[in-house]
């Protein structure tokens, strides 16, 4: 009888020391932030500012660009892609500071939004 009692006490103590099997571990599913992807490539683009002003921007293969409004050049400089963003560096003038834009994914009609670090977004469509 003592042996039976001893076995029961030992079994009870052993059961108390065991932890319950762990259930499924829930891991918070976080989507990685999408990295910016520049839509810039050599070509001619129609650009519409938030106030409706339209201009034409030509990105050349040598990474220079010109912007024109009603056929008159308003800005020239160089363009580059930095960290997946499109950056324009005017060659002269008061506004000759680098402007970088985060481009949205193009819509079915080819238009996309370019959002600058400072200022209002613009709508762009490659036309040639």
Image (cartoon, grey):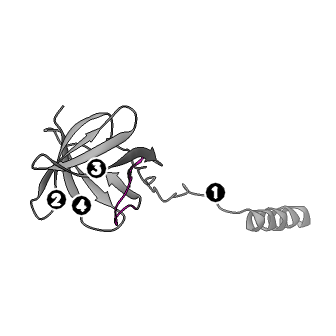
Q: What is the x, y in percent for residue 103? A: 31, 50
Q: What is the x, y in percent for residue 24? A: 54, 54
Q: Are marks 3 and 4 in contact (CB under 8 Å)?
A: no
Residue position marked by numbered label 4 in the rendering: 121
Is residue 42 positioned above or below 3 on the image?
above
Question: Residue placed at 88% from the left, 66% from the top?
Answer: 6
First to last magenta residue range: 84-96
10 Å crowding of disc 4: few (<14), some (14-19), many (20+): some
Question: Residue placed at 36% from the left, 41% from the top?
Answer: 64
92 magenta-colored: yes
| Sequence-wise first label, 2 or 3 | 2
Residue position marked by numbered label 1 in the rendering: 21
Quadrant where the image shows the N terminus: bottom right
- Tag of residue 49: 2
Question: Residue placed at 77% from the left, 66% from the top?
Answer: 17
Residue 104 shown left or right of residue 100 in the figure: left
């Amino acid at each position: 009888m003592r042996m039976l009692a001893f076995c029961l006490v030992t079994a009870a103590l052993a059961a108390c020391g065991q932890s319950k099997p762990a259930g499924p571990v829930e891991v918070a599913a976080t989507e990685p932030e999408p990295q910016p992807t520049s839509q810039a490539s050599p070509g001619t683009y129609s650009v519409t500012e938030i106030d409706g002003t339209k201009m034409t921007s030509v990105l050349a293969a040598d990474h220079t660009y010109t912007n024109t409004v009603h056929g008159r050049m308003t800005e020239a400089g160089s363009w580059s892609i930095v960290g997946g963003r499109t950056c324009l560096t005017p060659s002269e003038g008061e506004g000759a500071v680098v402007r970088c834009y985060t481009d949205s994914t193009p819509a079915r009609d080819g238009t996309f939004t370019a959002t600058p670090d400072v200022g209002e977004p613009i709508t762009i469509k490659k036309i040639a």
